[in-house]
Every structure is written in C-alpha cells, then in structure tokens.
Image (cartoon, helix red, strand yellow):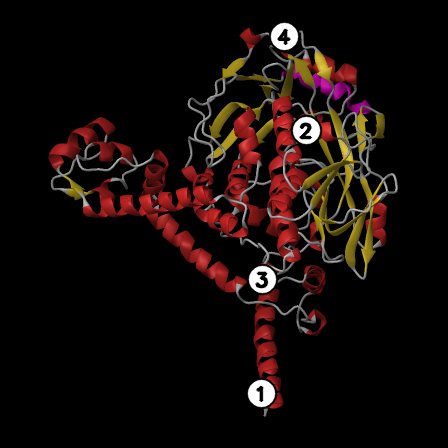
C-alpha cells in the first residue's frame, strides 16, 4: 500500500473506535485496521456500558469529546443509576445495550467519519526506523506507512479460547487470533505477560420461567450518559435476578476435574473482582448462593446474558448447572460460556500519554495494557488518539492528574502499580472521588475537550452557561432567607427542627433531610434553575466541609506533583535507597515525587531520601550554572 497515513489504529474494539475517531476528527489522515468491518464495536462480553466507577469513565470520555456515551444513549434498553442509596459521589450510571444495535451504531459513526479509512486485515508487525514507528505490517505482508501507530488489540494477541479441556486459537469466539506481533515487540525489548478473562453462556429468552425470577425495572426517566443527549425516549426493557442453589454448586464442583482453571490448562491470571462461577464456589464455599442477573441483549435478539455465571466448564456441566437455577429449569443455551487467554504488555513500559518508552510514536490502548472492561479500554483509546495527534502536531500532550479525572487515576495506576490481574476501575481507587463525580465531568473536563478541538462550540458554551447558573444559585442561597412561617410547615413534613427567626437558605439546605428544590419552591422570586444545576449546588452546599478538606488534599497532592524529577537522574547515585525502590524507580522513571510515591514497592522512607537528594541535586546544578556564567 503506497498511501501514507498520519496514524494507524490496530483493532476495531472500544479503544480503537475512540482512538480512530479522535485522530480523524482532529484533522489527521487515519486508518483503522480491523479483522472485519462488520465486527467493529462488537460487545464481546456483557452488552452493557457503565456501572460502578465505569459510568464515571464514560461521562469523562464524553466531556473530552469521545463517542461511547452517545452510542449507548442511542441504543440503550435499560438505564439505571446505581448506588442511589449512597452519597452522590459514588452514583454511577449504567445501561444495558441492544447489542446488535450498539455495534451497528458504532460502525455507522466510524464508517461515515471523514478522514478515516477502514482496512480489513490484522496488524501482525511494525517497521521501526531509528527508534520510531515507520509503518504497520499486515498479515498478508502489506505495509502501511504511518507516522504513529496505536495498538488496541484486545484479547486477540495469541488468543486461546477454553471450553472444558478443549481449547483452540482464537481472539474471540468465531474469530482468529493475531500471531507474530507479540514476538516482534518482544524482540524490540518489550516485556509481555498472559492474562485471562471469560464470558457466561447466553440463553434463549423464551426458555426462562419469569414467574420464578425477580424483575428489575429501569429508571423512569432514564439519565443519559452524554451531556449532549437531551433525553432518552427509546422503549426500555426489564432485567431479572435469580440465584444459584446448593444443587447448582454440586454440579459445578462435579465438573472441576474438567475445568481448565482447576486442571492447570489455563496458566494466566483472571480478574479477581469478576471471577468465574466455578471459582466463586471454591473461593466462597461458605456462601449458599450467588446472585445471577438475566440481561436481555436486545428487542429483536432472543439472547439473554447470564451475568454472574462466567465459566469455562464443559457444555454438559454448564447446561446442568444452569437448569438447577430457579427460573432456568428449561434453559436453552444459544452460546456457551468460555475463557480466553491472551498476551498483554505490563504498562510500566508506557508514558502517561500512553506512548511506549521503547519506541517513539507507538501507543498501546485497552486490554493490551492489562485492563478489563469496555469503558477502561475506550478511555485509553481516546487518550492515546488525542496524544498521538498532539505529538504529531507538535502541541502540548494531554496528561490529566488524579485530582482531575478517573481517566487519570486509571492511567496513573497502570503505570505505577504492578499489574498481576486484569485492572478494573472502582470508585475506591480515586482518592478525590468527592470532587470527581459523574455529574460534574462536564465542568471538570469540557474545557480541555474544547481546547483540543473535539467538542463543538455550542456544547462548550452550554457548559459555561451551566457553570454561571451554579454561581447564580450559590449567590441566591447566600443572599436570601426563609421566615419561620414559610419554612416550618416544610420542616414538619420532613421531620426537621423548626426555626424561630428568618434563616439563610444556604444554612437550611445543609440539613440532610431538606432538599434544595423544596426550599426554592417556597421562594416567590426564585428563578427556574435546571435540575442538574440545583443538584450541583445542593451537593456542594451540604458537603461543603468535606469538599474543602478534599480540596486541601488536592493542593498538597499538586505540590508533590510539581516537584519534578529530572529525566537524567541517576538513581544508582542516590544513597540509602532500598534495592527494590531503586529498581522500580529506574524501571518507571517517574515524572515527579508525587508519582514516585505511588509506585508499587517504593517505600515512604525512600521518598524522604529522594526529597533530600533532589534538593542537593538542584543546589549542585545551580552552583555549576553560576560558576559557568562567572
């Protein structure tokens, strides 16, 4: 192929979609190489987007100008805001997708994108000249010259599927594995490893006895993922819950002698927080039952995803165990569950831009970095795509810090922590989660998305108007009060203490049982503020003390982040460092003291040693500079 592309993206999954669309929309000539055009955007596992912490990632992707939120808004069939019983900081949107509709919508957006060419094939190699990517090499020997290459190969690198004791090469059921790329990268000096993930069986919806399962109705009205979606007006479907039984566990235990997990056939490590059902009954033997979610895969698709029943056991065991679950006595399996092993590249080999340290203009995104989940992959794809463009245009990279976004927490964790199992995002991983809520992702990140060039001006201006409305409402609460005559009837209804004198609204809204919307309804001159504005102000007012303490921690965090470590710092010359810390610091080469403090294996005492050495290093450099000038 003689065409020279600015950027080639390898892989048409969720990471590849975001990377390719971002690159093309920012004006660079982009090629997306994928095995088949008709599998772009395929949901290999659960046909759902979002969930605990993952929903935060999707809203941040949207705020930066990515696509995932808009696709799920267009194809979702069951929207739910999770964790409503807890504080708003951990509320997370989730939506079940019409699986086929999601894939088609993703393909429509990719295939219609100006400046983006889709090429069927697989990237099995690359050309590197003078330490920099020069071309992607396809399986058929074709060479695509490019200035940057983004690898988002998912589970396809030397992928192997397991069902019982049978296994075969495949990156995903029905699709071939990618061979040769891992070996070439290893020859270039990259370290590799093996991970494992799995999927449950799909059953026919007409084979479920709905009288024996618990219905889970969707939210009404649904909350959109995208800040650009006005409302969701598609019909919605219910999901259902059931539970395993003691009989289920007996069937599963009886099949362990043919389990690739328990016979040692599978060598790779799987996700600890999403174990297979056979792993659950062994690790949690004291539990009499495990929850199973029955999730429809679409209006016209008869398949139901059996969430919580991921397995690689043989077909007969899968069927017998399923039919022992209430409501599934006549279950008909359409597709068997399976496990897949694949190659990944430990992500300490990356910069925060997701560019590799060994090869210039080569980027990794998605499961190739040791993550699990569509949302984690899409976030990395977007960041890799943006940064590949910014570097080629000689612009400043987009590097978010942990106080700005869950996306930053994800990337920072990948680079600094030892990945022993597929990484999954949780709200507990974000130390500043009170500030990083799903509902304020637009306020946090849209300015960056607009400056980069991925957000339309009207969308950005809408965010600015929202920010101004928040200020207006905060001023209104500060300047206005309620009399006892007006407030006390509401207080009585809500079980709140009465007041004796007129009290500022700002003080009244801090009461846990009092809602800001109820207070505004009592005010004759209150402007009509959008619900999202009211929610923002209510949260910031009620949790003012906590937010202030967290903001103070952010300032301390940023002071450490601003203490930059020189790129040429020789850690072998830093006295008193422990051997493990010295090895990790040389391996990762952190940008700052803050990052150094988050590296697995680096002790707090070694950070103190590093701080002292850094001060001496700068004093010595200043002295040499002064001597040179004089």
Q: State yes or no: residue 223 in magenta.
A: no
Q: Is residue 621 left or right of residue 163?
A: left
Task: Check whether the beta carbons of the residues at disc 3 and disc 1 lie within 8 A of each other.
Answer: no
Give the Cα distance between marks 2 and 4: 24 Å
Q: Earlier in the sequence, mark 2 or mark 3?
A: 2
> Of all residues shown, which one is farthest toward the bottom?
630
**Rendered-image quadrant of the C terminus:** bottom right
Pinpoint residue 543: horizontal percent, then vertical percent.
35, 45
Which label lies toward us, 3 or 1? 1
Give the percent coordinates (x, y) of residue 342: 78, 38
User: Which residue does the numbered mark 2 point to in the structure image?
Assistant: 42
CA distance separating discs 1 and 2: 61 Å
Predominant SS along the magenta part: helix
First of labels 2, 4 by sequence position = 2
Q: Which residue is mark 4?
A: 206
Tell me the residue at 55%/12% (across/down): 213
Nearer to the camera, 553 or 393: 393
Per the image, the residue denoted by label 1 is 626
Q: Which quadrant is the N terminus positioned in?
A: top right
* Rendering coords of residue 595 (x, y %): 59, 59
| Residue 549 visible to the viewer | yes
Quote the CA–CA distance across marks 2 and 3: 44 Å
Question: Taking 456 as reference, is 190 above or below it?
Answer: below
């Amino acid at each position: 192929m003689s065409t020279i592309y600015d950027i080639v993206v390898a892989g048409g999954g969720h990471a590849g979609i975001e990377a390719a669309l971002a690159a093309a929309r920012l004006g660079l000539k982009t090629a997306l190489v994928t095995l088949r055009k008709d599998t772009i955007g395929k949901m290999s596992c659960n046909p759902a987007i979002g969930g605990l912490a993952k929903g935060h990632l999707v809203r941040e992707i949207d705020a930066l100008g990515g696509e995932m939120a808009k696709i799920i808004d267009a194809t979702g069939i069951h929207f739910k805001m999770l964790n409503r019983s807890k504080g708003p900081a951990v509320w997370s949107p989730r939506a079940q997708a019409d699986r086929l509709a999601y894939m088609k919508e993703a393909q429509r957006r990719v295939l219609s994108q100006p400046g983006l060419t889709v090429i069927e094939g697989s990237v099995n190699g690359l050309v590197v000249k003078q330490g920099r990517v020069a071309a992607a090499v396809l399986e058929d020997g074709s060479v695509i010259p490019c200035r940057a290459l983004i690898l988002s190969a998912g589970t396809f690198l030397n992928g192997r599927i397991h069902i019982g004791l049978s296994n075969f090469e495949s990156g995903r059921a029905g699709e071939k594995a990618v061979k040769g790329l891992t070996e070439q990268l290893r020859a270039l000096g990259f370290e590799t490893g093996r991970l494992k993930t799995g999927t449950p069986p799909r059953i026919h919806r007409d084979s479920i006895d709905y009288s024996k399962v618990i219905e889970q109705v969707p939210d009404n009205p649904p909350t959109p993922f995208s800040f650009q979606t006005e409302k969701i007006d598609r019909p919605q479907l219910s999901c259902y819950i059931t539970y395993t039984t003691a009989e289920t566990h007996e069937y599963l235990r009886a099949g362990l002698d043919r389990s690739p997990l328990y016979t040692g056939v599978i060598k790779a490590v799987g996700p600890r927080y999403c174990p297979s059902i056979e792993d659950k009954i062994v690790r949690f033997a004291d539990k009499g039952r495990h929850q199973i979610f029955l999730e429809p895969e679409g209006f016209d698709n008869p398949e139901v995803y059996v969430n919580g029943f991921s397995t690689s056991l043989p077909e007969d065991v899968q069927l017998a165990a399923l039919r022992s679950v209430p409501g599934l006595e006549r279950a008909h399996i359409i597709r068997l569950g399976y496990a897949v092993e694949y190659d990944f590249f430990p992500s300490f080999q990356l910069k925060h831009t997701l560019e590799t340290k060994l090869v210039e203009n080569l980027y990794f995104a998605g499961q190739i970095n040791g993550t699990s989940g569509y949302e984690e992959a899409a976030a990395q794809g977007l960041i890799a795509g943006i940064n590949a463009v910014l570097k080629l245009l000689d612009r400043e990279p987009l590097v978010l810090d942990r106080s700005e976004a869950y996306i930053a927490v994800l990337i920072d964790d990948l680079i600094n922590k030892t990945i022993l199992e597929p990484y999954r995002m949780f709200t507990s991983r974000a130390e500043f989660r009170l500030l990083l809520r799903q509902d304020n992702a637009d306020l946090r990140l849209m300015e960056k998305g607009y400056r980069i060039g991925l957000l339309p001006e009207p969308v950005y201006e809408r965010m600015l108007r929202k920010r101004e409305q928040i200020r207006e409402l905060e001023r209104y609460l500060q300047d206005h009060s309620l009399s006892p005559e007006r407030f006390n009837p509401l207080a009585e209804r809500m079980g709140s203490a009465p007041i004796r004198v007129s009290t500022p609204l700002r003080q009244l809204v801090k009461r846990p049982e009092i809602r800001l919307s109820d207070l505004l309804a009592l005010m004759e001159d209150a402007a009509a503020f959008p619900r999202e504005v009211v929610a923002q102000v209510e949260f910031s007012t009620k949790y003012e003390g906590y937010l202030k303490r967290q903001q103070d921690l952010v300032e301390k965090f940023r002071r450490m982040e601003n203490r930059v470590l020189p790129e040429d710092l020789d850690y072998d010359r830093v006295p008193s460092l422990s051997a493990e810390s010295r090895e990790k610091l040389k391996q990762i080469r952190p940008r700052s003291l803050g990052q150094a403090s988050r590296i697995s294996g680096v002790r707090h005492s070694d950070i103190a040693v590093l701080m002292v050495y850094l001060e001496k290093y700068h004093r010595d450099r200043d002295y040499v500079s002064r001597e040179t000038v004089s």
